[in-house]
Amino acid sequence: MERSWSSEAQAVLDAYPWESPGEKARAKAEAELVAFGKDVECDDLPLRVRRWQKRQARPRYVWRGESLKAATAAFEAELISQALAASNGNIAAAARALGSTPRIVSYKARKYNLDNVKRQTRKQRKEKWESSIR
């Protein structure tokens, strides 16, 4: 049964670097076979094609003439900022997500002036601890 194709799925199928026309035809037949709806969607394409599509959709870094040191610092600041945002400013949780230590993440957050960090003074930590044991 010949199914209709969504424009996005057809574009991905055409853009994929096939080794042979027969391979493309087999992938097309497989997608039509597993499709549930009346149209073949991107989710119906073979796994390797979907993975290739995700890799192509990733934003790539574009060098703008800055030094390696500046580019690395910008990348590191952005990565730490995202991890802190995902952990609601919790340095320990961000460090675990990054596979680092809280000390390093805290140092780098201060170094790059990141403002989404929940910083507590010793007094605040002590008060929180004392209230938790009462």
Image (spheres, helix red, strand yellow):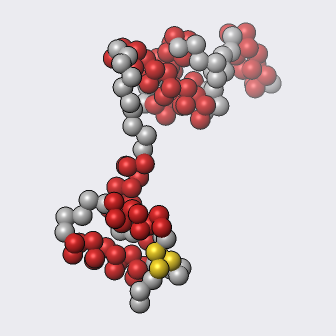
Q: Is residue 82 visible?
A: yes
Q: In the shown orientation, is residue 100 left or right of residue 29?
A: right
Q: Nearer the viewer, residue 120 or 126?
A: 120
Q: In the shown orientation, is residue 28 left or right of residue 88?
A: left
- Which residue is at 58% across, 28% downward? 84
- Which residue is at 46% across, 31% downward? 98
Q: Is 13 placed above or below 85 here?
A: below
Q: In the shown orientation, is residue 99 left or right of residue 121?
A: left
Image coordinates for residue 123, horizontal then vertical, percent: 73, 9
Q: In the shown orientation, is residue 89 left or right of residue 55?
A: right
Please tell me in which quadrant of the rendered image residue 24 appears: bottom left
Image coordinates for residue 92, horizontal then vertical, percent: 55, 26
Please tell me in which quadrant of the rendered image residue 134 appears: top right
Q: Is residue 72 visible?
A: no
- Which residue is at 41% across, 86% downward? 2
- Which residue is at 53% across, 14% downward? 112
Q: Nearer the viewer, residue 72 or 1?
A: 1
